[in-house]
Image (cartoon, rainbow, N blue to C red):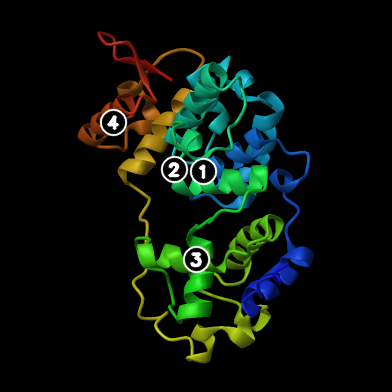
Amino acid sequence: MPPAPVLDVRVASVLDWFATEARDLPWRHDDCSPWGVLVSEVMLQQTPVVRVEPVWREWMRRWPTPGDLAAATQADAVRAWGRLGYPRRAKRLWECAVTLAAHHDGAVPRDEEELLALPGIGAYTAAAIRAFAFGERDVVLDTNVRRVIGRAWRAQPLPPAHLTRGEREHAASLVPDDAAASVAWNAGAMELGALVCTARAPRCAECVIASDCAWLAAGSPGLDAAPRRTQPWHGTDRQVRGRIMALLRAADAPLNISGQASLEDIEPGQLDACLASLVSDGLVTVADEGRGLYSL
């Protein structure tokens, strides 16, 4: 029997660290269903854990299976999404539930191609579901994992804007062959990036792989010079869309958006454009065009 492959010392250190420092998150519990993992991964896209956890708990209480959500309406899903942001994710999650109920007997598949065929499921989410819901060996690459690998192995302050083939191949080479260890590595690297090896203020003194980090050994170069990814908010179309959605979520009947006093500070042209974009995205419905009434 050939000897087990030797783990990179940094991978081994992350595994040891994660075994004792992992946050107790409900979608990591052994009794969490694959559907619960799928929901968590969609909610966690561009949204911090602290905001996701209470919404996830309520969502799973209300719709513990894909069939439960499929029996509800898209408007129900968008309302329950609340202020997590990017409400198209709620629409896609509802569409995903409908597809699972109709074509997969209400079960989340573990096959990669079947997962990628589901609404709203891309390469990252499919890999995360396979790893965290089914314990499969896969390469789970979110921004946190890419940042940890880029710093510790390649002395890069921040990962490139777009994932390259070379970067993915290098990440794949680090994943342990053992399935359970591979899952722990994917989750652990993600956790280290979220809590310690953060984008702008890394806590290197607390990092379990600091002594073997290529970026730290090089003097932590480039972070100050790296372009900051700012996201202006006030007055943007995204903010206006959010304000429209908040009004419609709270309404129990169709609304005349242009007649809402709380939106009077928005230029009519921007308001109309944002409303039209929400209709185009399938998030808002024209209830009565002649009277200018809209609903979820």
The residue indicated by pointer 2 is: 122
- Is 99 in front, or is 227? 99
**Along the polypeptide, which appears first: circle 4 or circle 2?**
2
Mark 2 crowd level (few <14, some 14–19, many ≥20, 10 Å Cα): few
Q: Are marks 4 and 1 in contact (CB under 8 Å)?
A: no
Instruction: Report helix, strand or loop for mark 1.
Output: helix
**Along the polypeptide, which appears first: circle 4 or circle 1?**
1
Q: Position of residue 193 (x, y in %)?
A: 57, 66
The residue indicated by pointer 1 is: 126
Q: Residue at x 35, y 80 (%)?
A: 225
**Along the polypeptide, which appears first: circle 3 or circle 1?**
1
Q: Nearer the viewer, mark 3 or mark 4?
A: 3
The residue indicated by pointer 4 is: 277
Q: Are marks 4 and 2 in contact (CB under 8 Å)?
A: no
Instruction: Report the Cα–Cα distance between label 1 and label 2.
Output: 6 Å
Instruction: Report helix, strand or loop for mark 3.
Output: helix
The residue indicated by pointer 3 is: 171
Q: Position of residue 261 (x, y in %)?
A: 37, 28
Q: Residue at x 52, y 38 (%)?
A: 83
Looking at the picture, which amino acid does disc 4 mark?
Ser
Instruction: Report the Cα–Cα distance between label 3 and label 2.
Output: 18 Å
Mark 3 crowd level (few <14, some 14–19, many ≥20, 10 Å Cα): some
Q: Nearer the viewer, mark 4 or mark 2?
A: 2
